[in-house]
């Protein structure tokens, strides 16, 4: 069986699995990293949103054969370490606004939020309502309004 | 968002005597145990029928006197066994809540009740979810927004007795009278300032023999925790990805398992034509036929998906054949009961309205799932269950075991909205685990959840009102619906208490309807009746059962009546509302929302009220139906009209956690918007066409109102009402009213876009699950 080596949350890992198994299952079912959630498996709900080499992606839609030793994957579990703190400022903002209800979507929401802030920074501008309107992450508990407030707050501290 | 902290009393508060449960002497039990343990019965407090103080032309309906939450509280009384609170030597206070936490915040509010009465920080309180406890009978059902209502008195009583006992233990240790001691922050404090921690007293305070004991609870003016905004106790776990849901559990050997499902609703397996071939696929360990399809167990869920797609199955017909939306609507229409308007003067004018509510999906973001480990003579199940006792019984029946041999563990749930009253995945997991002889971690694919999962039933609501001058003489509402499934335990609650209910001998659905639909307006002779047709569908409630639909019909008809009388919708409602608290919430939303301001063409305001679960709500909405807005583009999405402002006021009696209440209202608002504007499932040839969140258009960020204000009214009662579903109905109705005014036409079907051409390409039914994309590195 093919072997795959890549980095997850700062550590290099090697797994035996067929090339076409999507990364979400490698993370959850084989490595036991359960922060990224399953909500659709087809790149729609965004509950599994994580980062690869610093930008957001959906591991449910990436075969493990497409990643290599230089690829650095960050899940919600590894987000605080990217800023060398116990919690990332976006997580702090989520706590300050008491965003979560059931919490199932929230790891994905936070990873998408961090990515959005980085993206608009790169474009040299501030987050607008139109940017927030484009976020695709489903929250079936309907916490959207608090998510918007927390993102603006978290952005100001990133 | 804002919390209304204005303290001006609501208009009716002054002259009314409120039931003062807080001053009653309440009884609990000291239990002989190594450290301090106190037990109480759930549902300790009597059912206080709200005083029917108003003298009005409309006689109160059943739900006005005694509603669904009273029923669930009644159910919690005589049958319930004890629930226990324990203080351990480390100072922690433990309590296993016999309810399911699915996001509604009850572990937080329960921690607050305990912290309040025991005088300890919330961080010392540990609330866990109890496994199925058959001796609690009806009293382990999380539904009808009943948790806080049923547990408010009992949990506080347990904490207050524990506090009393800790004080007594400290008094003995110090040799001073207990009356000279006080408590704060988890300590007993002596007059000179010396302190003893609860942990250090936990053993001394323990009882050596069990006995009943009495205690006074704090009065609301002494509250330091209850009524103050608190963050969720599990917030940090949620934002760090550590909150553990059923599929995150690491049960040894419980490999991923999925089910290959039929192409039509509840279709049956006739033959599996290539089982051996699929069993030989990479990672696959088992392929077995179960009652709902073909279960596949593999090393990863990805390999389950590939195996399901490779299966060649011959399917038999399901329970609805090849019917489509129009067939079911015709069946519902045939079952509509006639109006029976009493004789009214000849000059009276009649208003007739008729509305259709299409099927809607009640999926949570976490799909149906359960872990099962079935052995020869015992079984263990893990999952989020709101009716774990019924789940335990059904699993035991399926396995042919005594219920006592089946342990049902309740995990944290990723949303419910009615879905988790059922345990469909638990039954499948148990069956698969038995047939495979191995533990399984069974999860539904998203498309399974939409197509074969439970739906909120299609219904129609017809209203006839007669109006003479400035009086409404009669109001009749006939609600006709595809049958709602109540076999999750609530049905048994109704049967068990039928003699005590004020509605006579009705069926389960009719009882729930009669107990949940209150009379909102002084409309003379008022009748509201439900009739159902059995359609062979898998149904369930969806953040309420009938109310959002009934409310939309009632409030739209109310606007028509107001129009006939040439009255402003807000002024009309204030004039005709039966409950004075409705006038107060209407006044607040009108003032904060700027009711009556001039709106540009294609945009409009709407207003609505809804009362339920001892709570009263009003909602003001502004909507934008202009062409540029309705036709705005978002990739793979339905956009449509945009609600631009929601102002929602709620009076729910004693508020335990204003932040939690606000969050519940906010969620209800998002649901109400979806129900009216965007979210339904389309039935075609025996299958639902939707298959993902990009097909089933629940509210997304591009639909979220830029302005949302939730106003929590000052408490008008010392008892807490339910809140989990309370935000939906008034919002759905106000959005419908605003939409109708913006487009200049009364909407008659919901969601309003159901009849438009589909905005997505339906996924195939064979194979039943889509393969995951492979372009995730470039497409986000
Ligand atoms: S599970 Fe990956 S986007 Fe839904
Ligand atoms: S918090 Fe429950 S789905 Fe978002």
Image: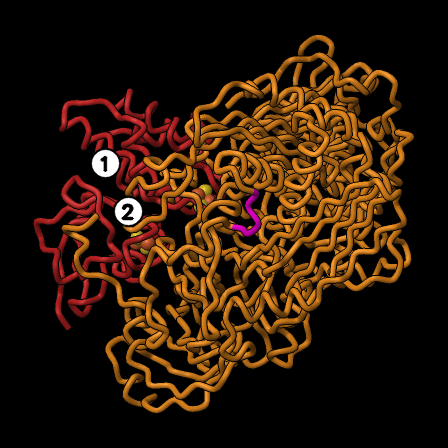
Chain colours: A red, B orange
Q: Is residue B733 left or right of residue B616?
A: left
Q: Give the SS element for disc 1.
A: helix
Counting from the top left corner in percent of width and height, residue B115 is at 65, 29
Residue B637, position as x, y percentages in the image: 33, 48
Does the numbered disc 1 mark a residue whose Cβ is under 8 Å from ligand 1?
Answer: no
Horizontal and vertical percent position of residue B527:
82, 49
Q: Quadrant of ligand 1?
A: bottom left
Per the model, the C-alpha gap separating discs 2 and 1 is: 10 Å
Work out which residue is located at the far top of the displayed protein and give it: B192
Quarter assignment of residue B137: bottom right
The structure residue drawn at horizontal position 52% and vertical position 25%, both measured from the top left corner, is B709
Which residue shows up at 57% across the image and 28% down it? B620
Q: Does residue B390 lie above or below B36 as drawn?
A: below
Task: Judge whether residue B71 can be spotted in this image.
Answer: yes
Direction from residue B697 to residue B15 in the image, left or right: right
> Which circle marks residue A115 in the picture?
1
Q: Quadrant of residue B585?
A: top right
**Residue B333, labelled with which disc?**
none
Q: Would you call the spot at circle 1 few (<14 residues within 10 Å), some (14-19), or many (20 or more)? A: some
Give the main secondary structure, helix, strand or loop, of the magenta stretch. Answer: loop
Nearer to us in this view, B470 or B664: B470
Chain identifier of the residue bearing label 1 in the image: A
| Sequence-first disc among 2 and 1 | 2
Do residues under tags 2 and 1 come within 8 Å of each other at their CB atoms?
yes
Q: Residue furthest front?
A: B347
Disc 2: which residue: A49
Subunit ID for the residue under disc 2 = A
The residue that appears at 82% across and 28% down in the rendered structure is B22
Residue shown at 29% from the left, 38% from the top: A134
Ligand 1: does it lie within 8 Å of the C-beta at label 2?
yes
């Amino acid at each position: 069986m093919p072997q795959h080596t890549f980095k997850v949350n700062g550590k290099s890992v090697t797994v035996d699995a067929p090339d076409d198994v999507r990364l979400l299952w490698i993370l959850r079912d084989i490595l036991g990293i359960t922060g990224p959630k399953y909500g659709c498996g087809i790149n729609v709900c965004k509950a599994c949103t994580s980062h690869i080499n610093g930008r957001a992606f959906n591991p449910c839609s990436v075969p493990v054969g497409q990643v290599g030793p230089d690829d650095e994957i960050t899940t919600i579990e590894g987000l605080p370490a990217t800023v060398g703190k116990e919690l990332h400022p976006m997580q702090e903002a989520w706590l300050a606004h008491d965003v979560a209800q059931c919490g199932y979507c929230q790891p994905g929401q936070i990873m998408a939020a961090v990515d959005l802030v980085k993206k608009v920074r790169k474009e040299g501008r501030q987050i607008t309502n139109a940017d927030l309107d484009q976020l695709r992450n489903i929250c079936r508990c309907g916490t959207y309004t608090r998510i918007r407030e927390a993102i603006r707050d978290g952005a100001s501290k990133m | 968002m804002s919390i209304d902290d204005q303290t001006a009393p609501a208009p009716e508060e002054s002259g009314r005597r409120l039931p003062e449960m807080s001053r009653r002497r309440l009884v609990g039990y000291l239990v002989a145990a190594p450290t301090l343990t106190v037990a109480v019965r759930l549902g300790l407090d009597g059912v206080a029928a709200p005083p029917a103080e108003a003298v009005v032309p409309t006689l109160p309906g059943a739900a006005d006197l005694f509603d669904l939450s009273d029923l669930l509280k009644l159910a919690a009384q005589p049958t319930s066994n004890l629930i226990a609170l324990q203080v351990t030597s480390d100072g922690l206070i433990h309590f296993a809540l016999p309810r399911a936490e699915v996001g509604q915040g009850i572990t937080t509010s329960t921690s607050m009740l305990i912290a309040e009465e025991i005088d300890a920080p919330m961080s010392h309180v540990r609330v866990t979810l109890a496994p199925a406890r058959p001796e609690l009978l009806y009293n382990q059902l999380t539904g009808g927004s009943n948790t806080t209502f049923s547990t408010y008195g009992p949990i506080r009583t347990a904490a207050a007795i524990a506090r009393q006992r800790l004080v007594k233990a400290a008094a003995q240790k110090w040799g001073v009278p207990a009356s000279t001691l006080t408590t704060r922050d988890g300590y007993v404090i002596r007059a000179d300032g010396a302190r003893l921690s609860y942990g250090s007293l936990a053993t001394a305070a323990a009882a050596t023999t069990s006995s009943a004991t009495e205690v006074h609870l704090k009065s609301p003016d002494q509250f330091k925790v209850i009524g103050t905004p608190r963050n969720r106790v599990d917030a940090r776990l949620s934002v760090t990805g550590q909150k553990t849901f059923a599929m995150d559990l690491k049960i040894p050997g419980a490999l991923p398992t999925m089910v290959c499902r039929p192409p039509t609703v509840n279709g049956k397996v006739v033959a599996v034509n290539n089982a051996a071939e699929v069993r030989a696929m990479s990672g696959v360990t088992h392929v077995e036929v179960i009652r709902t399809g073909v279960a596949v167990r593999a090393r990863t869920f990805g390999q389950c998906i590939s195996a399901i797609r490779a299966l060649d199955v011959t399917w038999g017909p399901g329970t609805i054949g090849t019917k489509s939306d129009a067939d079911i609507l015709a069946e519902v229409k045939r079952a509509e009961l006639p109006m029976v308007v009493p004789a009214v003067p000849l000059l009276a004018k009649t208003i007739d309205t008729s509305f259709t509510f299409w099927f809607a999906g009640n999926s949570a973001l976490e799909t149906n799932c359960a872990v099962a480990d079935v052995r020869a003579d015992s079984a263990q199940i893990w999952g989020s269950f709101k009716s774990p006792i019924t789940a335990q019984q059904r699993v035991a029946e399926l396995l042919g075991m005594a219920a006592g041999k089946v342990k049902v563990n309740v995990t944290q749930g990723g949303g419910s909205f009615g879905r988790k009253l059922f345990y469909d995945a638990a039954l499948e997991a148990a069956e698969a685990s038995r047939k495979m002889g191995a533990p399984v971690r069974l999860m539904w694919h998203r498309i399974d959840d939409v197509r074969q999962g439970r739906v909120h039933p299609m219904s129609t609501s017809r209203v006839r009102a007669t109006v003479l001058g400035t009086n409404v003489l009669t109001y009749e509402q006939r609600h006709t619906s595809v049958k709602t499934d109540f076999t999750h335990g609530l049905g048994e609650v109704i049967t068990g208490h039928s003699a005590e209910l004020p509605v006579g001998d009705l069926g389960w659905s009719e009882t729930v309807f009669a107990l949940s639909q209150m009379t909102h307006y002084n409309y003379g002779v008022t009748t509201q009746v439900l009739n159902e047709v059995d359609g062979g569908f898998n149904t369930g409630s969806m953040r309420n059962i009938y109310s959002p639909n009934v409310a939309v019909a009632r409030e739209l008809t109310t606007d028509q009546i107001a129009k006939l009388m040439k009255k402003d919708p807000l002024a009309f409602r204030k004039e005709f509302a039966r409950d004075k608290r409705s006038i107060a919430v209407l006044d607040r939303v009108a003032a904060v929302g700027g009711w009556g301001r001039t709106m540009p063409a294609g945009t409009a305001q709407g207003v609505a009220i809804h009362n339920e679960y001892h709570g009263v709500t009003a909602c003001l909405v502004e909507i934008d139906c202009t062409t540029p807005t309705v036709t705005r583009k978002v990739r793979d999405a339905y956009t449509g009209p945009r609600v631009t402002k929601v102002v929602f006021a709620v009076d729910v009696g004693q508020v335990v956690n204003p932040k939690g209440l606000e969050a519940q209202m906010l969620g209800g608002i998002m649901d109400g918007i979806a129900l009216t504007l965007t979210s339904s499932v389309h039935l075609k040839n025996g299958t639902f066409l939707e298959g993902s969140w990009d097909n089933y258009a629940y509210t997304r960020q591009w639909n979220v109102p830029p302005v949302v204000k939730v106003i929590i009214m000052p408490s008008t009662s010392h008892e807490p009402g339910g809140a989990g579903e309370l935000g939906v109905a008034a919002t759905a109705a106000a959005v419908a009213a605003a939409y109708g005014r913006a487009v200049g036409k009364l909407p008659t079907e919901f969601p309003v876009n159901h009849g438009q051409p589909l905005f997505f390409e339906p996924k195939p039914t064979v194979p039943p699950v889509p393969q995951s994309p492979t372009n995730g590195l470039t497409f986000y």
